[in-house]
Image (tube, rainbow, N blue to C red):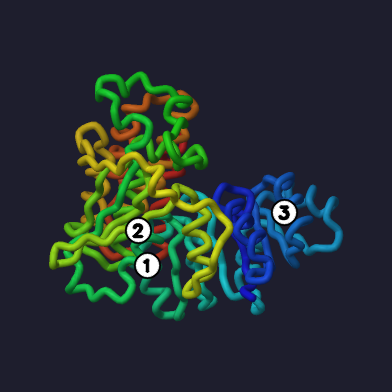
Amino acid sequence: MKKIVILGSTGSIGKNTLEVIRAFRDKFKVIALTAKQNIKILENQIKEFQPKYVAVLNSDAAAKLKKKIKNIEVFVGEDGIKYLLKLKNIDLIVNAIMGSAGLRYTYEAIKTGKIIALANKESLVMAGKIVMKSAKKYKSSIVPIDSEHSALFHLLHNKKPKEIEKIILTASGGPFFRWKTIDLKNVTPWEALKHPVWRMGSKITVDSATMLNKGFEIIEAHHLFNIDYDKIDVIIHPQSIIHSMVQIIDGEIYAQLSPPDMKFPIINALSFPEKLKNPFKRLSLEKIKKLSFEKPDYNKFPLLKYSYEIGKRGGNLPAALTVADEIAVNLFLQRKIKFNQIFKLIKNIVESVKFIKNPDIEDIFNTENYILEKFNM
């Protein structure tokens, strides 16, 4: 039985992870849960899954939870969460924390030498070279939870690097794929949050609308699989049935198909290298009317093209891109900037940062802090 810590258990990925564990109580045991401040959801999770420990980032929320939960130790703040990562009786750490904040916990988790089921793509975007080098040093395995990278993780298994012609990340296209560019200036937050396929948090949903989320996945794939940027393609696939593809040098293309349901990549990450028969709804091929593919419009979605540029330039710039996006999306959701101003603001912030070609982890955190202090309006 695998003993598991879930970072960010009250978010979308965290809740889906617990749904998977609920279906396999004989395979997985929750040892610890963490949350930022949503103790209402966390309290219900504690009652059902009976972890030995919990940690809450917000001190006021932690104090409230301590009054409600008497038989479980409640840790507080960033140090409290990091302490749980060092528990000796755990096998796997799920990092489902959203945004740049997740990097700190990925970096600390790697030092434990444990298996990390990684949903926090920002860890690899911001500090991919550092994260992968540290994972090798501490013999920590990183298994991706992103559906695209989960697909690639299995498609590339036992494939030799010289056999790979390219990898292909599929993208739904988001809610504005069919819109005219001129109409994007009038997009409201409500419209941006109406994803046609996936149900996700607000930040990642807006990133999908700008297609920067796919840009992040390009950078993530580069580091995770050591694939050159020129061998990473993106194709629009509105049905979101094929999650990624691998093209071999002989011209063959291998694809991974499954329903657009995060429980599938989650169960693959938790059970790897084992395969478990799960109770979740299967893909019905006869009910799929078509699988269509189109090239992305890089003029309509400039952040997708910009991601390639920033990824190739490397250094601390992908970290700047990540933090700048968090600021821009927040301002858009507050209606302080328009949708078509997101790219311009992000680019202005990124280009204002002093470039560091070979940053260490502190350089990455300093870049983040610089941007937050200067631009977090």
> Quarter-wise, where is residue 96 in the image?
bottom right
How far apart marks 2 and 1 lie (CA) works out to: 9 Å
Identify which amino acid the numbered label 1 is placed on.
His
Residue 351: x and y, percent? 27, 44
Q: Residue furthest front?
A: 286
Residue 155: x and y, percent? 32, 66
**Circles 2 and 1: CB distance less than 8 Å?**
yes
Q: Which mark is residue 45?
A: 3
Residue hosting label 1: 154
Q: Which mark is residue 256?
A: 2
User: Residue at (30%, 35%) from the top-left corner?
Assistant: 343
Judging depth in this view, the residue of 195 and 278 nearest the camera is 278
Which of label 2 and label 1 is nearer to you? Answer: 2
Residue 305: x and y, percent? 22, 43
User: Residue at (29%, 54%) from the top-left corner?
Assistant: 218
Q: Residues within 10 Å of mark 2 (few under 14, many from 20)?
A: some
Which comes before the other along the chain, label 2 or label 1? 1
